[in-house]
Image (tube, rainbow, N blue to C red):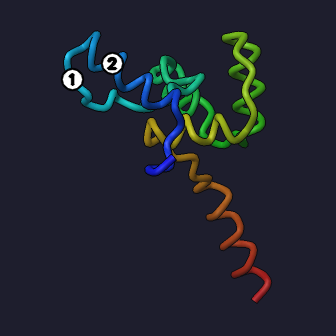
Amino acid sequence: MQFGVAKSYVQKLIRQKRLEGHLVPKKQGGTMKGKLDDYGSELAEMVQSYPDLTLLEYCEYFGEKYNIWVCASVMCCALQKQELTRKKRLCVVAKRKLQEFKN
């Protein structure tokens, strides 16, 4: 073991050279497809129709409507991929008014 590689690795290289005629490395990995990647329009419609729902409520709604049950982190990633925001502007305005009233 002068070069620190296993005999099986050398055998794989010899086999690859014989079959393919080269030793170019093969493509590794790839992108993982999300469970909700094919539902972009449905997600956009859901966020537009119900902008004040929480992630858990989105998960429940999506599961009931499309029978695809996901956790909050999967829903969050899917919404971020679609660049859909869930800003609760009405809630922020109400909190500001409450703080102004207290002062």
Closer to the camera, 22 or 3? 3
Residue found 33% across the figure and 18% down from its top: 16
Which residue is most to the front? 2
Give the amino acid type for the residue marked by disc 2 in the picture: Gln
Q: Sequence order check: which comes first, mark 2 or mark 1?
A: 2
Residue found 60% across the figure and 39% down from its top: 51
Kind of element beneath mark 1: loop
Mark 2 = which residue? 16
Kind of element beneath mark 2: helix
Which residue is most to the bottom? 103
Residue found 64% across the figure and 63% down from its top: 92
Crowding at dot 2, Cα within 10 Å, few <14 / some 14-19 / many 20+, comes out as some
Looking at the picture, how far across and down is residue 96, in whole percent? 66, 73
Closer to the camera, 50 or 70? 70
Crowding at dot 1, Cα within 10 Å, few <14 / some 14-19 / many 20+, comes out as few
Give the amino acid type for the residue marked by disc 1 in the picture: His
Asked if the residue at tag 1 contacts the one at tag 2, i.e. Cβ–Cβ closer than 8 Å, the answer is yes
Closer to the camera, 6 or 41? 6
The quarter of the picture where residue 46 lies is top right
Position above or below: 84 against 17:
below
Closer to the camera, 96 or 28? 28
Looking at the picture, how far across and down is residue 30, in whole percent? 42, 30
Position above or below: 34 against 82:
above
**Separation of disc 2 and disc 1 at Cα?**
7 Å
Position above or below: 12 against 28:
above
Looking at the picture, how far across and down is residue 75, in whole percent? 64, 35
Which quadrant holds the C terminus?
bottom right
Mark 1 = which residue? 22
